[in-house]
Amino acid sequence: IRMTIVPLVVSLLVVGVASGDSLRTVGALGGSALLLFLGILIAAGLFSIAVSPALLAPLEIDPAAAASLRASASQAAADVAESVRRLPTIGQRISELVPANPLRAAVDGAMLPLIIFTLAFAAAVGRVAPDARDTVVRFFRGVADAMLVLVGWTFAVAPIGVFALGATLGARLGIAAAGAVGYFVLVFSAILAAFTVLLYPLAVVGGRVGLRRFAAAVAPAQVIAFSSRSSAVAFPAMITAVRDRLGLPPAVVSLALPLAVTLFRVSTPLGLPVSALFLGKLYGVEIDAWQLASLTATSIVLSYSVPPIPSGSLFLIAPVLVGMGIPAEGAG
């Protein structure tokens, strides 16, 4: 999983930003849609930060079991955990957001500085001559497609790895493992459901549509998304809901909706903070407020690069976890 992260994230960001010819011609609708996505992503991250610690507070993990899990982690993760205990100051962290050496940031797995450089690079590519820009975009699109094929191969054998990780966890924690994971699933689901409900008033007020009509229109797409775990698979049902049931303008169908399916991954900033806090409890790693805020900011940026596959965010969380001192296998 971790070996695909850097080329996948970089290539997807370059393609998404540098090939945005349409974004320069869509005017207010495209800009408003992107601003709305960003606002909801920030709200989702803040919501998760606000409720996750309280919801996970009742969960208790046996300290001895957590120590055993840490001991079983790889030496690389242990080395990272030791470096995390020697954290730089806030000023140093802010200054390091712009990498002096982007290749070093890629080697070290420093995702947020690497993303900042990639965004700047992609924006610059978008301003060069069309022939040169198209060459660069085609190259990175090929890299992204190849990485997605590699991700698909990884998913094909992922059940074996997840079973092994689960068996190890169960052997070390016993029945407590099932209870802990079950509790996490409930908390995670509750956070997703609660934020979804909070979006309904936004749709009703901002979209000037009745609550009953809106809920009935989006229900088929939600059923498909719930069963397939893919917004791309639910895209045709979304088109039907927007065009036929809600009667929104054609520009929404042709622009705002594809942008939403392609870029809008609201579950990422909702899920990463609660996942990191849960894994911190599981492995006995304390996560401070700065780390949680930094993780949320990173998750908002990373959400634009989540591969369009079920559980695509797992391929982005692994290096972030390692940077917080949590073994990468926690993603499994």
Image (cartoon, rainbow, N blue to C red):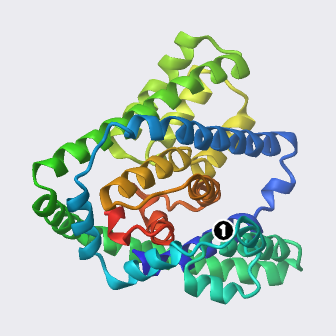
Residue at 39%, 57% (x, y): give it.
280
In the rendered view, tell whether residue 15 sits above or below residue 226: below
The answer to whether residue 181 is left or right of residue 50 is left
> Where is residue 96 shown, x and y percent of the image?
73, 75
Tell which of 180 and 70 is nearer to you: 70
- Residue at image mark 1: 13
Q: In this view, does 145 lie above or below 66?
A: below
Is 32 on the left-hand or right-hand side of 207? right
In the rendering, at what x and y percent does residue 101 appear? 72, 88
Q: Quadrant of residue 206?
A: top right
**Relative depth, front residue between 326 and 5:** 326
Count numbered badges in the picture: 1
Secondary structure beneath label 1: helix
Amino acid type, label 1: Leu
Q: Which of 195 and 136 is in front in this view?
A: 195
152 to 56, vertically: above or below: below
- Quadrant of the image for the C terminus? bottom left
**Residue at 67% across, 43% down:** 42
* In front of the other: 250 or 3: 3
Kindly identify the residue that appears in the image at 52 percent across and 44 percent down.
270
Q: Is residue 291 above or below residue 100?
A: above
Q: Would residue 257 be seen by someone viewing this image from the given angle? A: no
Q: Answer with left or right where residue 278 lies relative to residue 51.
A: left
